[in-house]
Amino acid sequence: MPLFPSLPETPHLADVFKAFPGHIKPLLLYHDALLRGDSPLSVAEREMIAAYVSGLNACNFCFGAHKIMARAFGVEETVIDALIDDVDSAPVDDRLKPILKYVAKLKDLPPRLRDADAQAVYDAGWSECALFDAVQVAALFNFMNRIIEGTGVAFDYADNPPSDNEIEMRRTRTYSEFGKSIGID
């Protein structure tokens, strides 16, 4: 039996949103602003951070969904898998590594963040705005991962990979448009 008996046996996030639509529209608008709005970080980098944090949290749904989103914007899924294994040896731009280490520490040990952690980001050439955007993405996906796990979402993109056409569609569709497609206006 699912954690929420009103949901299907293998619920998708769409099932949760449709069952409990009350506060979803502002959440989707925030996703759009944060992940698609102006930022020193590219859309691909923000989606990579979303997937990375979700992978660290062992949230299979968000890890899979945002690996696909990152792929839609040019990041190979193997790169994100490599990040989970070891940021230092992962094939990503060295400039991103301090940001990824910062969000990993934020996920695990936020009270242990130090000036040196932020300084490493700045020394890599990033602005405070870039770091704040990375912090927001990490915070949003810690939050979303708890919603996914707390409601028993069991859909796994590893078992249900999207077609190339579906991946391309994700490149152009906003989070709010996803909401509208399931009846969230």
Image (spheres, rainbow, N blue to C red):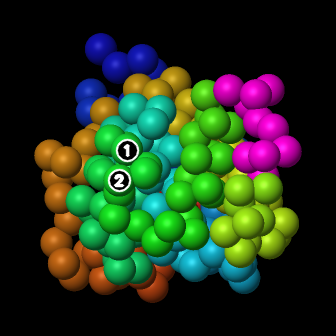
Work out whether residue 74 or residue 99 is closer to the camera in this orientation and state it.
Answer: 99
Q: Residues within 10 Å of mark 1 (few under 14, many from 20)?
A: few
Which mark identifies residue 86? Answer: 1
Residue 70 in view (yes/no):
yes
Quarter holding the C terminus is: bottom right
Q: Residue at x 35, y 57 (%)?
A: 90
Cβ–Cβ under 8 Å for marks 2 and 1: yes
Residue 14 appears left or right of 19: left
The picture quadrant where one finds residue 120 is bottom right
Q: Is residue 100 above or below residue 142?
A: below
Over which residues does the magenta segment extend? 109-118
Q: Residue at x 63, y 46 (%)?
A: 103
Residue type for callout 2: Ser
Q: Is residue 104 above or below residue 135?
A: above
Quarter holding the N terminus is: top left
> What secondary structure characterizes most of the magenta part?
helix
Residue type for callout 1: Asp
Q: Which residue in the protein does label 2 denote?
A: 89
The picture quadrant where one finds residue 175 is bottom right
The picture quadrant where one finds residue 91 is bottom left
Q: Is residue 122 above or below residue 159?
A: below
Residue 178 position, x and y percent, is 49, 67
